[in-house]
Image (spheres, grey):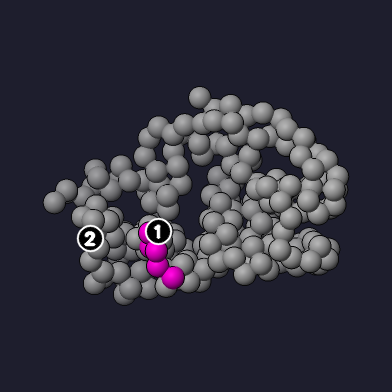
Amino acid sequence: MTIIRKLEIECSVCGKKSTHPVLSSTNSFGSPDLDFRPPGMSRSTMNTWIFECPHCGYVSSRLNEKPEIASGFLKTDKYINCDGFEFKKDLAERFFKGYLIADEEKNTKKSYFNLLYCIWVCDDAEDIENARKIRKLSIGYLDELIEIGGEEKNDFVLMKADLLRRSGEFDRLIEEYNDIIMDEQIYNIIITFQIIKARQRDDACYTLDDVKKDMPQQ
């Protein structure tokens, strides 16, 4: 069950208060997409993942926490105009502004996930061209995260395969992933699925259930 409450939050940048929908609880039933987008009710709560102060324009998942940037950045053309992107949905703009702030803070992981969430909103809005462009933009940040390594490295490797395929980078996906062998067999099955779809020049959205249905378990 999804529960959303309205809460008044004080902006850490301008000090003014505004009311926002805050997620108390949710759930997910079904199969995630291959870029790890959750199924079910959880995927419909994205408007509670990031907020925008209506007074100063600051965007964050935690408006009451001060950003590590100069407040003047929020007044730049780059920030106000989303670096030239014109999105169909305000929520996509919010996530992109979150990315711009994170990039200014030199926070690679935060930058990547704000771009990923922006992509998901664009997908829902059938904002196909922007979704493709943001996917291509996000890959550079994902490469940095893969290079850093850590517990999430394998997840990032799988995410990158989907981002490459869905952005039309079919040949690059095939070249980079053709010889990759991972410890978990399901990961190898997913990679094989991605390579097959790349060879078919297929950039459609697929879920983990699609992989399990089409690919034999070994």
Q: Is residue 37 above or below residue 190?
A: above
- Tag 1–tag 2 contact (CB < 8 Å): no
Q: CA distance from mark 1 to mark 2?
A: 14 Å
Q: Report x, y in % for residue 16.
A: 86, 45
Identify which residue, 148 or 132, lies in the foreground.
Answer: 148
Q: Is residue 53 above or below residue 108?
A: above
Task: Name the residue tied to disc 1.
Answer: 152
Classed neighbour count for the residue bearing mark 2: other residues with Cα under 10 Å, few (<14), some (14–19), many (≥20): few
Residue 87 appearing in the image: no
Answer with the quarter of the image where residue 83 lies.
Answer: bottom right
Identify which residue, 129 or 89, lies in the foreground.
Answer: 89
Q: Is residue 183 above or below residue 32?
A: below
* Residue at horizontal 57 percent and vertical 37 percent from the top: 45
* Residue at horizontal 63 percent and vertical 29 percent from the top: 4
Q: Secondary structure at mark 2?
A: loop
* Residue at horizontal 77 percent and vertical 54 percent from the top: 58
* Residue at horizontal 58 percent and vertical 26 percent from the top: 3
Q: Which residues are magenta?
A: 148-153
Residue 26 appearing in the image: yes
Q: Report x, y in % for residue 181.
A: 23, 66
Give amino acid for label 1: Glu
Disc with the residue nearer the chain's start (1 vs 2): 1
Answer with the quarter of the image where residue 28 lies.
Answer: top left
Count of numbered tags = 2
Classed neighbour count for the residue bearing mark 1: other residues with Cα under 10 Å, few (<14), some (14–19), many (≥20): few
Task: Name the residue tied to disc 2.
Answer: 183
Q: Main secondary structure of the magenta part?
A: loop
